Amino acid sequence: MPGHCCVPLCRANYPDGPKARVFSFPRDTERRNKWLRAIPRKDYTPTKFSKVCERHFEEQFFLHTLRYEDFTTGKVIEVRRSVSRLTDDAVPTIFPECPSYLSTHLTSREGPEEKRSRREFEDLQRVMKNSVQTFEEARVIKNSAQTFEETRVIKNSVQTFEQTFVSTFSDLLVAIELTEMSDFWTVVRGKEFVMFLNLSQHDVPTLQHSVTIKLDLSITVAFKGTKVIKLPGLTIPESLSNMYELTGLLEHVEKHATGATQRCSQFEAIMALIVSLLEDLCRNESADRQASLTFLKDQVSLLLKKSSRYSADNLAFCALLYAISPHAYNLVRSSAISLPHRTTVYHLCSVHKEIPTAELQDHNFLSQMKSRVNSMEERDKIVALVMNDIHIEPYYSCIDGTMGETSISPPEPAKTAHVFMVHSLLSPNKDVVHILLSSDITAELLHYFLKKLIVRLEEIGLRIICITTGNNSTSKEAVAMFRQPEKLDIVYPHPADPSRPLFFVIDSVHLLKCVIIDWINQKDQELSIVFPEFEGSECCVSAASLETLRKLCLFDENSLIRFPCSIKKALYPTAIGVQNANAALKVFNKSVIEALKAHEEDLECASETANFIGILTKWQNIVSAKMLSKRRQLQGLSQYHISSMDDPQLEYLSSMVDWLDRWEALRLSEGTLTRETHAALRLTCYSLIELCRYCFEELKCPYVLIGKFQTKSL
């Protein structure tokens, strides 16, 4: 009797349920943990008798056939298994009896070794097919010849053709004598090998490239003494079968000799492979592991570069660490970790003074950015300036009763680091241009510094079209001073050229955080926000309840089926946690909407709350899009680039502006957003629409990624 399925609500192999094959939990700890994380069963510990039925696995995870590839003949033998089995990467992802948001779709990815083996076998089959076809054509021509002259010509053609086939080492030696070689190669013949060598033209010749063919006709390719198994655009055959393969290989190596010489020292080849593997891991791991893997990738990449160029995240971290404790920074830098020199960090940072003119007039101001702009293409110089405030713990380090090294610390300990970054609109480039440390700064001084910074960035060659800040009063007042009299608007005269526009956008993640704060601060018992329907009559309103979300969390704690993401910290924030902008993203999430719909009958206002969250979730997906895809029809359009003013993303932003206007027209005194949050939401939507219009009509950009105008990367 097969075992019962342990997945919640599944009745497979029960007396009243369907019959299905079952599979035991993997013995491998890593795979076993993946199964446990996938199955929505809280605090479950499987035994050796625990089973999962076949109904919970996708078809791609079943092996129904057994495949054998014969490399000597190029034939593929494939037979059907009597009993199908699971692949090594199989994970249960289908839970039909559970809510739909618990089921996911995983894409089975072919491993590097399997991919390389498959391509080599396909190349072998193609070569053998071409050889047989060519031989048959020559044989047909030979048999069809009628006259003596035709026969003589065909005999010569067949003889030349047959000379290209190499079955023994002796055939190879004869064929080489009849083949004209490039001056790039020096041929060395031995009793058991033939070597094609490329030597450097220096006083002391050194071996650069080599192709060796041994007695058994096996081929070895090496660059500077390092064996290579694959070249760009060509798979190296394991053994030689005809001279076409040899001449093609020699021509390919000669063509790529310059690039290969630069890349393929033993150290560089291994390090490049490590970087490639870390990039693959970064794409497939969780957010927590991604940060660690990205740090490792950056460290390995620095070892490959002659001149170190640090990432924007790395520079921001180093500047803050040096500002907090120079001694700690020097200690970390003296270890094996690669960090910028202290002078580099010093030039990147400045200290807020009463009038911050000293750092603006310093010849080292923006020195790092000047050198980078010189190597940029013209299209990379169209950028958005992003500003964000990072709060740090104010203190000095004290050693033996004296103040420690405070080379960039202000007279008072710094409480805030104002980080300025530029995002290129048409390339992945992003750079930290400056970090301003301050204990307390007014809007007037921040405006003065911001204006001078924009002018200096324009002078060194960048073209700034937009400023993005958080939704705080100091930043908004500083930007509003670009117009006299002061006014918060979507566009201002450009400080470097008043005839050009300078757009203003408030970061979307900060706005969602403000929405959550306003929602928590409602006065009624249900913590309700009254809002008009997004599509429909102006007089039709609904109420979204935060208390409904809190009850949903209680369902999660008491249910066997786990909630996909924890929103409890966002709904019950601490004094510090309320400032966490990323916590808001967990509330405005598709999985929360699905969970509310699943419990619609059990929770009051569940449908209305789901509608409210859905409006802002779709808006967040649109304004955070950073993906450039040519296959947008396969996934959600809202998460990809905008290619014209007629795209549905901009239509939604326009509808969002109308919705906010109808909401404001209700003139609610309670159960609504604060005036500041409401105005900031409308300003950002309207500004993004006009910013896209400017990019398409004036700058002639082929596309726009709205996610470039965000402070999230800081």
Image: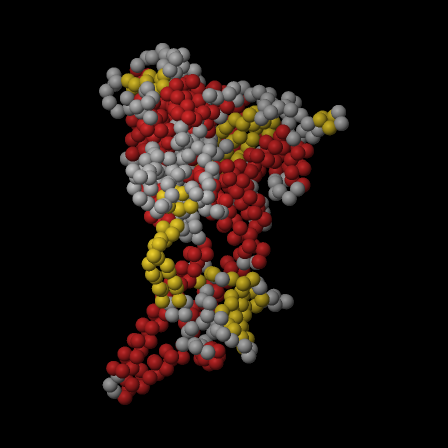
Left or right placement of residue 706 versus residue 148 in this view: right
Q: Residue at x 24, y 85 (%)?
A: 146
**Residue at the farthest right position:** 400
- Where residue 197 sits in the image (x, y, percent)? 54, 70
Q: Is residue 318 above or below residue 191?
A: above
- Where residue 111 sits in the image (x, y, percent)? 44, 53
Q: Residue at x 39, y 39 (%)?
A: 6
- Where residue 422 sits in the image (x, y, percent)? 48, 35
Front-most of residues 243 and 56: 56
Q: Residue at x 30, y 79 (%)?
A: 139
Left or right placement of residue 329 versus residue 484 in this view: right
Which image quarter: residue 366?
top right
Front-most of residues 41 and 209: 41
Q: Is residue 665 above or below residue 335?
A: above
Which image quarter: residue 534?
top left
- Where residue 302 sits in the image (x, y, percent)? 57, 46
Left or right placement of residue 136 versus residue 239 in this view: left
Q: Residue at x 43, y 56 (%)?
A: 114
Q: How is the image coloured?
A: secondary structure
**Residue at the farthest bottom position:** 148
- Whether residue 550 appears in this view of the structure is yes
- Whether residue 702 appears in this view of the structure is no
Front-most of residues 706 and 480: 706
Q: Is residue 276 above or below residue 152?
A: above
Front-most of residues 336 and 468: 336
Left or right placement of residue 219 versus residue 39 in this view: right
